[in-house]
Image (cartoon, rainbow, N blue to C red):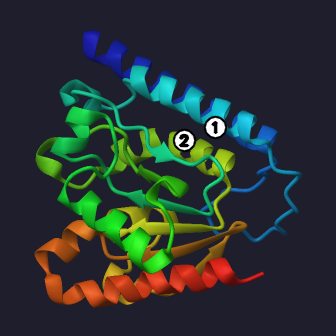
Amino acid sequence: MTGSSEARRRLAAVVADFRAALEAESEAGVEWLAWEETRRPVPAPRAAPDRSAKERALAAVATEVAACTACKLCDGRTNTVPGEGSPDAAVMFVGEGPGEQEDLSGRPFVGRAGQLLRRMITEELGLDPSAVFIANIVKCRPPENRAPEADEAAACIPFLRRQVAAVRPRVIVTLGNPSTQSLLQTKEGITRLRGKPVRRGGFTFLPTYHPSYLLRNPPAEPDGRADFRVVKALLSER
């Protein structure tokens, strides 16, 4: 009975998060599923919320993430890692999940992979890293830095949806296979998808390698940097 009660409690929490996500998106003028193919026409979004409204929405997500117990990842975390960056960011980067350093600090991409990501943002996009928004599919560290499991990603996606609804980035950069496959709902690998813009649900996605992969495979770094230059070109479009 105890296990059954715990399962019902976690399911109720997921349902509550999903309902809150839909309400937040509606308030922000987002009336479609941001990363799902749709056969119905995409309505024009209403006027974007002002910066203070965005900040409140992002702070609310961070507060809820800190208390979340919707999946088993909560059992092993030191800190939740909701994400950080500018509420007015034109670019949002989405990885798969926090690593050890992120779990300890509560901040995304602060280890060696994060240092490389921030260098590429500065050198290839010409942006200060504080001007973008950086997040992950899941907000708690998976054990041994493994990829998030399906139920874990499903429990956390409502938080990411609300962050996207608040920030409204012009480009969402998906870093690596788990992020790309989750957000674009595909089984294609990053090697085939990288560097190719995907326009879906009112947003432009650009898949590329995760910076940790580039650290393990230095010859791939020029391709990763080329993908960032695609992002820069997308930002220059009117």
> Residue at the location (21% across, 27% down)?
78
Query: Relative to 140, is 47 on the left or the right?
Result: right
Indicate the secondary structure of the residue bearing disc 1.
helix
Q: Earlier in the sequence, mark 2 or mark 1?
A: 1
**Residue 173 against residue 61 in the figure, above or below:** below
Q: Position of residue 135 (x, y in %)?
A: 43, 50
Instruction: Using a 10 Å C-alpha cutoff, classify the residue at mark 2 as few (fewer than 14 neighbours), some (14 to 19) or many (20 or more).
Output: many
- Three-letter amino acid code at the position of disc 2: Pro
Labelled pair 2, 1 in contact (Cβ < 8 Å): yes
In the picture, the disc for residue 38 is none
Q: Is residue 157 visible?
A: no
17 to the left or right of 2: right
Count the marks: how many? Answer: 2
Which quadrant holds residue 195? bottom left
Is 92 drawn above or below residue 71 in the view shown?
below
Question: Taking 61 as reference, is 142 above or below it?
Answer: below
**Residue drawn where x is 18% and y is 29% of the image:** 76
How much space separates mark 2 and mark 1, taking CA atoms?
5 Å
Question: Is 188 displayed left or right of 217 in the figure?
Answer: right
Per the image, the residue denoted by label 1 is 21
Query: Which image quarter: residue 175?
Result: bottom left
Q: Foreground residue, 150 or 20?
A: 20
Task: Identify the residue shown where x is 46% and y is 44%.
Answer: 84
Rendered location of residue 169, percent (x, y): 64, 60
Residue assigned mark 2:
158
Horizontal and vertical percent position of residue 33? 67, 56
